[in-house]
Image (cartoon, rainbow, N blue to C red):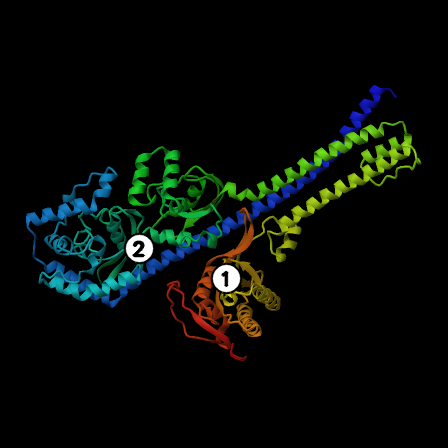
Amino acid sequence: MSKADTKGLRRRLATALVGVAFISVVLLATVIFIFARQLIDGSVESQLTSIRDTRVQAFEIGAKRLQSNVSTLAADASIVDALIDLSTEFKALDEDITPAQVDELTALYDTEVLPPFVEAGEDIDASTLVPGSTAGRYLQHHYITENPDGFDLRDRLDDAGDGTEYSAAHAEHHPLLRALMENANMYDLLLVDVDSLDVVYSTKKRIDFGTSLLDGANAASGLGRVVDKLSSVAVGESVISDTFFYVPTHGQPVFFLAAAVRSGPDVIGAVVTEVPVQALTSIMTAREDWSLLGLGDTGEGYIVGSDRTLRSDTRAWLEDPDDYLGRFVDETGDQQRADLIETIGSPVLVQQVDNEAVTAGLDGDEFLGNVTNYLGTKTLSASGPANVEGVNWAVVVEIDKSETGSALNSMLRSMLLVLAVLLPAIAIVGVLLSRILTKPADSLVLSAAEIARGDLGSKVEDLGRNELGDLGRQLEGVVRELESREQAIVDQEQHINEMLLALLPPRLVDRVRRGEQAISDILDTATVVSITVDDVSGAISSDQELELEITERLSEELEALMGQFGVERIQRSSESQLYVTGLDHDDARVADAALFAMAAKKTVAEISEEFGQALEIRSGMSAGDVATGVLGTMQPSFSAWGDPPGRAVTLGSLSGPGQLLADGSVIDALGPEWDVGPPEQLPGLYDDVDAHVVYGPLDGPAQ
C-alpha cells in the first residue's frame, strides 16, 4: 500500500467515523425536537382556547349581572316614587333663567366639558348643548352652575335652596338614589320621563341633566339610543348600548344600560345607568391579574366592537402607556390619534384591531391561529363572539409567538451546545483512528470495517505485546469511547425527556406516552382549596434550624394528607398553596376537599403544639368549572384557571386564624350533613359571593 493510498484510506475512514456519529446525533436530536414542538404547541393552543372560553363566560356573566342590576332598580319602589315625584315637579316647573345666566352656563361648558374635544380637533358649539326646555335650563343653572362643588362632586348637593317643589322632591329622593348608584358601582344614574323623554334627574349632575332625548343634544347619542331600544324589549328586561365617546363625561368612552319603570300596569319612564369602559377592562383582565388568568408575560384579553375598535383597555396600555403610544405611532404613523388616546386616557374606540381573529369573532365564529395584532406583533390568538343581546362584540385572547416558542428555543440551544461539544471530539477520535487503522493488519482492518458498520460489540484480535497488539488494544479503546459517546447521547435523550415530563403532573404522563398531543383538561368540575400557614419564619425568627425542621414536617404531613384524600397541589402564589380535587372525576369531590382542609388544620395544630410554636392556618374553598393545562413560558408550569381558584384565594385571605371559609357552591355540595356558619358578605369579596365558615361534618368531632 503506497503512502498516497494510506492517506486516502485515512481520510475516508476519518470521514466515515465522523459522518456516522454526526448523522446519529443530528437525527436523534431532530426527532426529539419535533416531538417536543408538537407537544408544547398543542398544549399552548389548548390552554389559550380554555382561557378564551373562560373570558367569554366571565364577560357574558358580568354583562348579565349589570343588566340584572338595572332591571332590579327599575322595579325598586324608591325608583318608582322618585320618578313620579321628580317628573311631576319637572313638568310643573315654570321658571327660566336670564340670558346672562345662559351665558354663564355655556361658559361653563366651554371651560369644563369641551376642552378635550378642542384638543382632539372637534368643534362643538356650546350653545347647542343648552337644554331646550325652561325647566332644564333652570335646573342646570341651580344644580350645575350654582353648585358649590366641582365636576365629580356635584352629587353631594341635596337641595339647591331655590324654594321650588322640584328641589323639595330632589332633597327627599336624592340621598337614596345616590346610595343606590354608589352601591352598584355606576358612573351615573338617570331618570327619564316617558312622555317628554326629558332627563328629569341625574345623580352626578352632568350636562345631560334636564335635556330632552327626543330632540336635545343627547338624543342621537348612546343615551338616546338605549332609551329608544326599550320599546322593542319585553317588560322587565333591560337593554345595553354600544360604547361611544360621551360629551357630558369629558368625552370619556362609556356605555349605558336602561330598563323601563312601571307604576302598576303603566310605563312611567326609564332608569338609565352610565358605566365606564373600565368595568369591561376589569372583567377581561381579572383586575389586571395576568398570572391568575394564566397569560404569562405577554398574554392579554380584550374586547373589539363591530367597528373593529377596542371596547376595553389592552395590557400594553395598562402596563406602560408611554411605550404603547410610541409603538402605536411606529405602527400607524398617526400622531393625531395617538394624541387623542393620551387625551382621553384610553385606546378604546381609537385603536383599530383588524385581523382574522376579530373577523371570526364578529361573525359569530371561534378562531385559533397566528395573527398580527394591533401593534404589529406576531401572536397566537383565540377569539369568539360575546353573546350579549344588543351589541356585536368579539372577545380576543392572545400571547406573543416569542413567548410560546421560548421553551423550544431553550431546548434547541441545549441541543446545539451538545453538538458543539460532541462533534469536535468525535472528529479528533476519527482522525486518530484513521492513522492507526491504516496499518497492514487484516484482522484490524476487518474489525475496523465492523466498527464502521456500527457493530461496537466486535472483538479485536489480541496480536500480542508488539506494535500490532498495541494497535489492537488502541482500537479496543476507541470502541469503548464510541460506546461512551453513544451512552452520552442516550443520557441526553433521557434528560430532554425529563424536561418534558417536568411540564406535566404525574397523572398526565401515561396520556402523553399513549400519543396524545393536547395535554390539558379543557374544562372540568373541581374543588379548589387555598391554604396559608401564617408566617412560620415570623413565629420562629431566631432559630433557622427549627424553622427548617417545622417547614419540612409541614410539607411531609400535607403530602401524606394529599394522598389520603386524593388531592393534587398547584402553586398559585407566593403567599399560599392551592389544592384541587375532582379533576378527571365525575364530580368535584367537595367533601374530600373539605375533609382535607380540616385534617390540615388539625395537623398544623399538632405540629404547633409539638414544637411549642404559635402557628395558625387560614383556608378558603370554592367549587366549579376549572380549566387546567400548560402554557409555554420561560418556565412552563401546570396550573388551573377560572373563578374557583381566584375565589378560593380571596376567601383564604379573608378567613380568620383557624377558619375555613367556603362559598355557596361548596356549601350546596356539602349539604345538611355538615356544620356550617350562616352566609355573610365580607369586605373585598366578590359582590355575588357569600362566605360561610365550615366547622366540620355533623357526624364527627368539631374541627
Q: Are marks 1 and 2 in contact (CB under 8 Å)?
A: no
Amino acid tagged 1: Ser
Which is nearer the eye, 535 or 66? 535
User: Mark 2 Cα within 10 Å, few/some/many (few <14, many 20+)?
Assistant: many
Vertical placement of residue 594 versus 120, above or below: below
Pointer 1 residue: 576
> Where residue 130 sits in the image (x, y, percent)?
14, 48
Residue at 17% across, 60% down: 157
User: Mark 1 Cα within 10 Å, few/some/many (few <14, many 20+)?
Assistant: some
Vertical placement of residue 331 versus 91, above or below: above
> Where residue 402 sits in the image (x, y, percent)?
51, 41
Residue 220 in view in this figure? yes
> Where residue 174 sits in the image (x, y, percent)?
20, 63
Which is nearer the eye, 125 or 299? 299
Q: Quadrant of residue 117?
A: top left
Report how far apart the C-alphas of labels 1 and 2 lie in the structure: 41 Å
Which is nearer the eye, 529 or 261? 529
Numbered disc 2: secondary structure = strand
Which-is-in-front pick, marks 1 and 2?
1
Q: Earlier in the sequence, mark 1 or mark 2?
A: 2
Identify the disc placed on residue 223: none
> Where residue 278 sits in the image (x, y, percent)?
34, 52
Residue 265 in view in this figure? no
Q: Quadrant of the N terminus?
A: top right
Amino acid tagged 2: Val
Pointer 2 residue: 239
